[in-house]
Image (tube, rainbow, N blue to C red):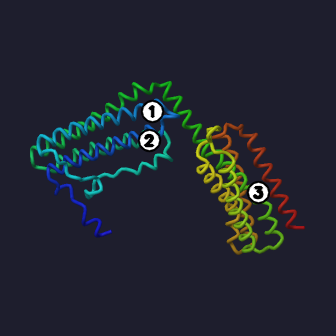
Amino acid sequence: MLPQLSNRRRFSDLTEQEILALAISSEEDDARIYRHYAERLRGDFPASAAIFDGMAEEEDGHRAALIELHQKRFGEVIPLIRREHVAGYYARRPVWLAETMSLERMREEAAGMERQAEAFYRKAAQRTGDAATRKLLGDLAAAEAAHETRAGTLEAEHLGDDARGEEDRRSHRQFVLTWVQPGLAGLMDGSVSTLAPIFATAFATHDTWTTFLVGLAASVGAGISMGFTEAASDDGELSGRGSPVKRGIASGVMTTLGGLGHALPYLIPHFWTATITAIVIVFIELWAIAWIQNRFMDTPFWRASFQVVLGGALVFAAGVLIGSG
């Protein structure tokens, strides 16, 4: 770490030419990020994609003006200096994170990029005593502030209330289909399907460690099975349910967590303390699932309660009866 830090320049040590070169590379990077966002959104959210296309064009205009200024002051050769070369300079997230970003998260990220760039330029302008450098940095800050205003204009132009509402509804629906539905199915399966083996083992052996191992094995096994089943069942192309990998992860992780919820109490060595704790957790799990179904799946609460709580209670009773017998 220390050798890498020592190779980074402080902003206060940069020359005016290097500051200008840094601004040029930063504008180029931001334009590429906006175009990546636009390409990511173009199929499902064309209005928002148009906004990011417009913002990328604005960045191109800023970069062209900066290059022209550099040519007038310092000539044709622009030094290679980027964000990662300057200590304390704001960083940008890798573009591959856009694959998992929601539409609203991309909007927030873009707004933050503009505010961050403006704040940096203004702070840098305050730290220099050179009039030309101060003017240069002040102009860059004003350009970023104008860009943020322009982003609002583009949003009003391409994304009216109806379009934004439709894209928000579509984004919410995609989130539900890709993450909530598979995760909820996994949580239900993990919570309910592991009740019988865990409590059957508990009442058959009265051994908390053995019960925990059975619960751990059942939870992990169910998680792996549900994850692969969800990922392989639908590639998402026709159904619109999104990435099979994301759905598989959501289903597998939540299945495992659903089972571990009432397996972990058996790490407590006292049998009845562990069992009562596990029963309380089961009660909370089942009602939480009913709430999630009502909140995200628009399932009437009492219908969800009947399906989940009654079903879970029957599986729990079956496990206790089998184990006691």
Closer-to-camera residue (2/215)? 2
Q: Are marks 2 and 1 in contact (CB under 8 Å)?
A: yes
Please tell me how crowded label 2 is: few (under 14), some (14-19), or many (20+) other residues with Cα within 10 Å: some
Q: Which residue is mark 2?
A: 106
Distance of label 2 from label 3 (alpha carbons): 38 Å
Q: Which residue is mark 3?
A: 193
- Sequence-first disc among 2 and 3: 2
Closer-to-camera residue (39/290)? 39
Q: Residue furthest right?
A: 325
Lateral position of residue 304 relative to residue 61, left or right: right
Residue visible at 45% across and 25% down in the picture: 160
Q: Which residue is mark 1?
A: 48
SS for tag 2?
helix
How many numbered marks appear? 3
List x then y, in percent, for residue 282: 72, 57
Q: Nearer the viewer, mark 1 or mark 3?
A: 1
List x then y, in percent, for residue 87: 26, 58
Distance of label 2 from label 1 (alpha carbons): 10 Å
List x then y, in percent, for residue 29: 32, 45
Residue 206 numbered tag: none
List x then y, in percent, for residue 77: 17, 48
SS for tag 1?
helix
Q: Are marks 2 and 3 in contact (CB under 8 Å)?
A: no
- Sequence-first disc among 1 and 3: 1
Q: Quadrant of the N terminus?
A: bottom left
Please tell me how crowded label 3 is: few (under 14), some (14-19), or many (20+) other residues with Cα within 10 Å: many
Lateral position of residue 173 relative to residue 52, left or right: right
Q: Nearer the viewer, mark 2 or mark 3?
A: 2
